[in-house]
Image (tube, helix red, strand yellow):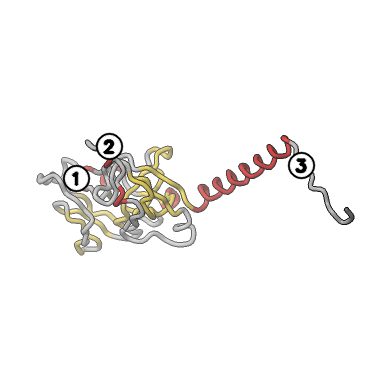
Amino acid sequence: MEGKLLKETPTFWAKVWEYAKSILVALIIALLIRTFIVQAFRIPSGSMIPTLLVGDHILVNKLAYRFGEPHRLDVVVFKFPLDSNKDYIKRVIGLPGDRLKIVNKVVFINGKPLKEPYARHTDSRTIPRGIQPRDNYGPVVVPPGHYFVMGDNRDSSYDSRFWGFVSRKALIGKALIIYFSWDPHGANPLHWVRWRRIGRLIH
C-alpha cells in the first residue's frame, strides 16, 4: 500500500543500548544531585537526641551554604575537623564574632543566655571547670569564617567544646528532612519503622 511506512523491529543489541543509555543518564543525574544539591545521610549516634534519633535517615540541602550563610540553630552536616573522612552533624550555636561561654550547662552568647528548647540534659551532675569542658567552657570568641557547634544531647555529645570550631569550608549542608527512620532494636518487628518520624522537617 502506498504511503505506508514499515516499522523496523529493533535488534536485541539495539534494545540493550537503549536501556544502557537510560540507566547511564539516570546515574549521571543522580550523581549530579548527590554532588551539588541533596545528599542522604544516616544518623549513627545519639548526640542529636531528641531532634535526631539513631537510625534516622535524612536529606541534606547542599545548596544552602553555597548561596547563603549559616544561621544560629541550623542543624548542619560537616567534615569533622580532626578527620575529614568523617561526617558529623551538630547544631550551630556560635557565629563568627560571637563571644560564647557555658556556665553550669547554660550557654551564653554575647552575655545573654541562649534559649534552647531542643537541648536535652540527662546527667544531673555538673562537671567543674578545669576537669573537662562539658558543663563549663570559655569564654571564647568565635573566629572569622568559623562556627561553634553542639549536639542537642548535651551531656553525651562530642562537639566544639572538646575539639574546637568548624570552618566554613568544612560545611556540607543543612539538614532538611527525615525521609526514613529505622529502629531494628525494638522489641516488636512491626515497630521497627518509625512511621511518625518520616517526612518530619528538621529544626
Q: Residues within 10 Å of mark 3 (few under 14, many from 20)?
A: few
Q: Which residue is mark 2?
A: 189
**Dividing the picture into quarters, in which one does residue 14 lie?**
top right
Give amino acid for label 2. Pro
SS label for mark 3: loop
The residue under the point 16% across, 40% down is 131
Residue found at the far left of this picture: 124
Q: Is residue 117 above or below residue 126?
A: below
Q: Which residue is mark 3?
A: 9
Give amino acid for label 3. Thr
The residue under the point 44% across, 54% down is 61
In the displayed structure, does residue 28 sit left or right of residue 49? right
Q: Residues within 10 Å of mark 1 (few under 14, many from 20)?
A: some
**Dividing the picture into quarters, in which one does residue 112 lie?**
bottom left
* Circles 2, 3 touching at the beta carbon (< 8 Å): no
> Whole-Å distance between the Cαs marked 1 and 3?
68 Å
Give amino acid for label 1. Asp
The tag on residue 155 is 1
Nearer mark to the viewer, of 1 and 3: 3
SS label for mark 1: helix
